[in-house]
Amino acid sequence: MIKKFEDLIQEEDTKLAAYAVTHRDHGGRIYEEGDHEYRLPFQRDKDRIIHCQAFRRLEYKTQVFIASIGDNYRNRLTHTLEVSAITRTVALSLGLNTYLAETIALAHDLGHAPFGHAGQDILQELMAAKGGFEHNKQSLRIVQYLENRYASFPGLNLCRETLMGIMKHGADYQHSNQMETRKLIGPSLESMITDVCDSIAYNNHDVEDGYESNLLTLKDLKKVNIFEKNYFLAKKKFPQVSEKLIVRETIRFMLNSMVTDLVHEIDKRLNENKILSRDDLGIAYKNSIRLVGFSETMNQSVTELKKYLHEKLYKHPVVLELSNFGKEIIQVLFHYFSDNEKEMPDSYLNRMEADGKYRVICDYIAGMTDRYAEEIALDKNLIDPFHDL
């Protein structure tokens, strides 16, 4: 027998904690659609993210190493999938809405520029006096406006609760109704856990990619407390395996320790602060009580690891060369299209009057993949074709 919408709602509600976001409380959509016969609201949102163009393009956007360097390193898409998996684990363990949590995780980097954080930094600089650029705001712009898949509405028409989850605290979202509501009731736990799960994902996979690329050495990694501790545990369990495999096992142990600590610490804080409803979450938020985070000991360990990665990997000459190459491409493209805006696709030119020239140029460049941006720059003779990475 097919489970109808109301059956699915009732079944889902029995699995959720009192402070979770239920599908009944999805907030509706900006453009009313009505309920689907057998699909839940956040389930539909998740599917819309996966099917959109911006999500597919993440495959060819840099995490740390650009695509041309090798096939085995993380890209923006594989990073997003890892964040989604970790977020689902945490959400499920705490009785949260896994569909909502996964959807927020899958959407969190949709607005990221090509060439990783270097790309975002240069776009921020170029747009500083022209309205600014920030990838979280761009993610919201994509799902509300830029995606063009449906005849009935612009964007993806996601649930309002999903839109609030994509927003980040403190950012300027042009005084949107969703942001005002978020300030009033506070962010959902599903939203808050995504931020920490994002950091868990990149802290661990950047260690692996850094080691696999020979930019980080085992000798150096063992100077970091959390790595050394988990290396000892992995080595004790698997004393005969190769160095490469023991490093991978160490990272697995390390990731598990972070997730486990996060789950137990959130549960502890929820109990200490007597969080029994979404209203209680809002009160805690207004009183600046932080409910999501690591224990003090784990936080110190993660902070040390982040500092190590910043100094030894992100500032490594090889990574800096890649970053500078990406910045150069984005900069020359921005200036080129500022002088030759009519060479952009019609879909962008059609928005020029409504959005302004520089916002449209920013949208165009931010949506590019690394390789497409490089191809355009080469085709326009804007960069050296013999540049050796």
Image: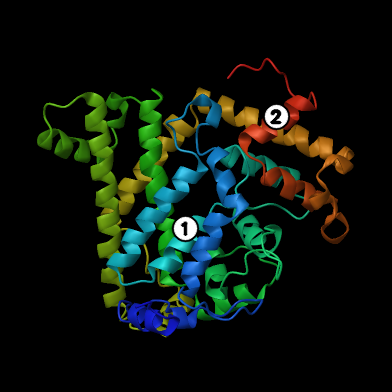
Question: Dot 2: few (<14), some (14–19), or many (≥20) neighbours within 10 Å?
Answer: some
Give SS at disc 2. helix
Q: Residue at x 15, y 39 (%)?
A: 233
Q: Reply above or below: 291 against 273.
A: above
Q: Which residue is mark 2?
A: 375
Give SS at disc 1. helix
| Residue 196 placement: quadrant | bottom left
- Quadrant housing the N terminus: bottom left
- Residue 218 locus on image (x, y percent): 28, 26
User: Disc 2 residue type?
Assistant: Glu
Question: Dot 1: few (<14), some (14–19), or many (≥20) neighbours within 10 Å?
Answer: many
Left or right placement of residue 85 versus residue 24 in this view: left
Towards the viewer: 9 or 370: 9
User: Disc 1 residue type?
Assistant: Ala
Q: CA distance from mark 1 to mark 2?
A: 30 Å
Q: Which residue is mark 1?
A: 105
Q: Which mark is residue 35?
A: none
Asked if the residue at tag 2 contacts the one at tag 1, i.e. Cβ–Cβ closer than 8 Å, the answer is: no
Q: Nearer the viewer, mark 1 or mark 2?
A: 2
- Residue 140 locus on image (x, y percent): 62, 61
Q: Earlier in the sequence, mark 1 or mark 2?
A: 1
Towards the viewer: 269 or 333: 333
Q: Residue at x 67, y 35 (%)?
A: 372
Q: Reply above or below: 322 against 87.
A: above
Mark yes or no: residue 242 visible. Answer: yes
- Residue 281 locus on image (x, y percent): 41, 78
